[in-house]
Image (cartoon, helix red, strand yellow):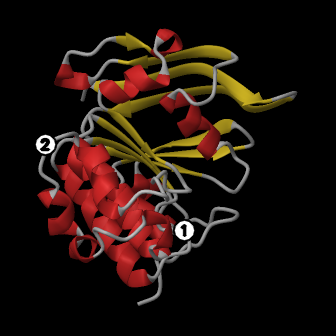
Amino acid sequence: MSVELSLRGVRAGYGAVEVLHGIDMDIPQGTLTALLGPNGAGKTTLLSVIAGLLPLRGGEVHWAGGGHGLDLDLRATPADARARAGMVLIPERRGIFGQLTVEENLEIFAGAGNDAEPAFSSFPVLADRLSQRAGSLSGGEQQMLAMSRALLQHPRLLLLDEISLGLAPRVTRRLFDVVAELARSGTTVVLVEQYLSDALRLAEIVYVLARGEVAFAGEPGELAGQALPGYVTAGPPT
């Protein structure tokens, strides 16, 4: 199995505080990798480093791109160049343009002249909200709009940070279905998720962070039945 993303000795933090203390990680190409751990473990920080939003203090991040012909040393690759090469981050706060309409957001995601139909197929409610400002949507609708970026930009590497946070079970299930479909289509997905059972169900590889270090790396079956501090072990209620 080809390695899409390789991290070696990654250190990063904010101000005087170092959050990541030498992370080693290999993300296989075309798989869904879950990144787990309690609040404060460094999960969001790690996604920010990968996406280029937070600089490295030490170590290396290398994006080989699997079969896509990429060979990027991300220490020398700015965030916008990573995005153009096919990396998409959907942050915990969704990353939509709240002052713009749903239609304008979709046009930005898809690019001029491209079809937004894949977003409507997965999230039909968006077709009824085209003229509505994105910031006035419900939380679930905002997350659907954010996920549309992944559907319309066809990313090679998709980074997802707590996409189910605070959402109704019905919305959460649909979002997870879309994530699974993207992974099956060959997109490499790194998923930070609050619901342990759903993360383990979707993932092929699992990393657990604790206090800015890798505490576990392996297959989800090895963690089944174990409790992780700060985690909801069950999925959203039905």
The picture places residue 125, in percent across and down from the top left corner, at 26, 77
Amino acid type of disc 1? Leu
Q: Reading the chain from its start, which is encountered first: label 1 or label 2?
A: 2
Q: Residue at x 49, y 31 (%)?
A: 51
On screen, residue 46 versus residue 181, left or right, reads right
For the point 48% across and 72% down, the residue is 136
| C-alpha span from label 1 to label 2 | 33 Å
Q: Nearer the viewer, residue 166 or 233?
A: 166
Q: Is residue 183 visible?
A: no
Give above or below for 140 relative to 69: below
Q: The C terminus is located in which quarter?
A: bottom left
Residue toward you, 195 or 219? 195
23 in relation to 120, above or below: above
Residue type (three-letter) at the residue carrying disc 2 = Gly
In the image, residue 10 above or below residue 112: above
From this view, report whether residue 205 is shown above or below residue 98: above
Q: Nearer the viewer, mark 1 or mark 2?
A: 2
Q: Residues within 10 Å of mark 2 (few under 14, many from 20)?
A: few
Residue in front for this viewpoint, 142 or 129 = 129
Residue 65 visible in the shown view = yes
- Looking at the image, residue 216 sits to the left or right of residue 1; the answer is right
CA neighbours of label 1 inside 10 A, class few (<14), some (14 to 19), many (20+): some
Residue at 27% across, 16% down: 70
Residue 48 pos. (x, y %): 57, 36
Q: Which residue is mark 1?
A: 165
Q: Which element carries disc 1, helix, strand or loop?
A: loop
Label 2 element class: loop
On the image, numbered disc 2 is attached to which residue?
113
Residue 146 screen position, x and y as percent: 39, 57
In the rendered image, the quadrant that contains the N terminus is top left
Residue 21 occupies quadrant: top right
